[in-house]
Amino acid sequence: MSPGGVEVRELGHRWAACSAAGDLAFHWKCMMAPPTVLDYVVVHELCHFHQFDHTDAFWNEVDKVVPAYREHKEWLRRHEAGMDV
């Protein structure tokens, strides 16, 4: 897969998305997260260029770049409701 376009928009319940065409979309609320959490979201989506699903192989790729990814996932879960502006 090759990189495509990048958008920031409303994504409903998702923080980001990677299409089969390589287009990336990020929820506008991501910009309110701490930089380390935003880094995790970006790395998560970029790892889909190697593994399009969420198998163990995918999470191993994320872990190579962001070893604390579980903490960042938890931060998003705990704070998502308060990120409405």
Image: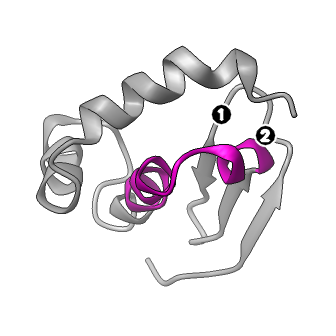
* Quadrant (top left/top right/bottom left/bottom right) for the N terminus: bottom left
In front: 58, or 62?
62
Residue 35: in magenta span: yes
Residue 66 horizontal side relative to residue 48, left or right: left
Residue 66 horizontal side relative to residue 6, left or right: left
Q: Position of residue 52 (x, y in %)?
A: 38, 52
Q: Position of residue 37 (x, y in %)?
A: 45, 47
**What stretch of residues is rendered in magenta?**
28-45
Residue beneath the point at 52% across and 28% down: 76
Main secondary structure found in the magenta portion: helix
Cα separation between marks 1 and 2? 5 Å
Residue beneath the point at 70% across and 79% down: 5
Q: Residues within 10 Å of mark 2 (few under 14, many from 20)?
A: some
- Asked if the residue under mark 2 is in contact with the one under mark 1, i.e. CB atoms within 8 Å, the reply is yes
Q: Which residue is mark 1?
A: 14
Give amino acid for label 1: Arg
